[in-house]
Image (tube, rainbow, N blue to C red):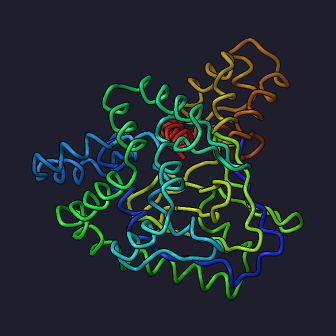
Amino acid sequence: MSVTIDIDGLPAERITAVPSPLAELGMALHALSETGHHPQLHGWATGVSGRLEACLADRLCEAEFLWRTSIADIFWPFAAIPGRRTLPGATLLDELELLDKLTDDQFVLAATEFSCMPYRHSRPETSPLTDPEARCRVLELAAARGARQERFTRRLLDDPPAVRAWFRRLVLDCEEAFFADLWARTQTQLAADARHRTELLRHKGAAEALSSLSNAITVDEETRTVTVDKLLVGRTATGDGGLVLVPTGIGWPHVLVLHRHGWQPVIIYPAQASRPQAPTVEQLTRRLEALAHPTRLRLCRHLARGPHSTGELADAHGMSAPEISRHLAVLKKAELITSCRRGRYVRHQLDLSAVARLGSDFLEGVLR
């Protein structure tokens, strides 16, 4: 499973790395709502939540489904501008002006993604403002997720301009309450990361620059396809538009791909300084499969206590050396054991750090 972007015919000058304050605000709101996704931000989130005025906190609760389970596409409105080559604004006000350029249909479709609408990336979407069947479907899905979400969805469908004005005011109040300080601390780092990607594009080419964003991203230069390793399936193409790379300082472990029909493709990636390296979904799958076999679990128990040779393990488990070797090969391919030669013998040992990371690696893999 993965999200792919067809970049056939896309020249390097139409790939742009640039920070987006509105996208970063979306990440910040998500981190405040889902602290379990971002344990490294627990202190920051606790501090911000404790300082919020009650009125603003209530409004954030009212609309948190715009950013909690998934971040609605209204946080990157530049991608919806006709021509598909518009870049993020330098300030929140600049980006709100871009948001104002969206039609009511675009705004509602981008906002109602929180209602678990099927994400039909490859074809035009039917607007619930004009299609009664689509409206009923959106309200039904919203009601299934709670009365608060249903009320908000009804307001959005009945009076889009009022909700758009409400959302604009919410963004500006968040800027005053906490985001201005966060942006002041991270803006320089994000701009430096964007410059680094631009230099890679200029000197090393698109494939190396895009692959550098995350070890979850690969580029097939022959088919001109970018593949983002995620536990979902999606596809988009740059066509005659561009591709925007948006660094985030607060969004790790998420690597997001905007692939809505008719919108410019966007990759939101953790800035270099903010992320540790983690295995791909394929590597994670190999590790989980390796540990799913009871014999390999018993081998891990021995190997966690110290290095052992294949012969020692065969004697301890009452198995033949070739059988033990086959199990060790699976563990080694999963990068869960290390091996070193001592004279005539090769001794194997469990990589305790790799096993210790498995829980957090699994969490990152499913959140990516």
Q: Nearer the viewer, residue 259 or 233?
A: 259
**Which residue is at the front of the view, 27 or 214?**
27
Viewport quadrant of the N terminus: top right
Residue situated furthest top in the rendering: 318
Give 109 or 356, whichever is nearer the viewer.
Answer: 109
Residue lying at 33% horizontally and 42% vertically, measured from the top left? 64
Left/right of residue 233 with respect to residue 18 in the rendered view: right
Q: Along the line of sight, which residue is nearer the eye, 238 or 105?
A: 105
Residue 121 in the image: x percent, y percent?
68, 48
Tell me which corner region of the image, top left, top right, bottom left or bottom right, holds residue 83: bottom right
How far across and how far down the image is residue 231, in percent?
64, 40
Q: Quick check: can you spot residue 335?
A: no
Residue 12 image offset from top left, x and y in percent: 72, 81
**Residue 266 seen:** yes
Q: Is residue 336 left or right of residue 250?
A: right
- Looking at the image, which residue is at 16% across and 52% down? 47
Q: How many marks?
A: 0
Q: Position of residue 57 (x, y in %)?
A: 18, 46
Position of residue 270 in the picture relative to residue 231 (left or right): left
Q: Residue at the location (40% across, 38% down)?
A: 153
Give the residue displayed 28% in from the left and 54% down from the top.
166
Say which quarter of the image contains residue 176. bottom left
Q: Quadrant of residue 36?
A: top left
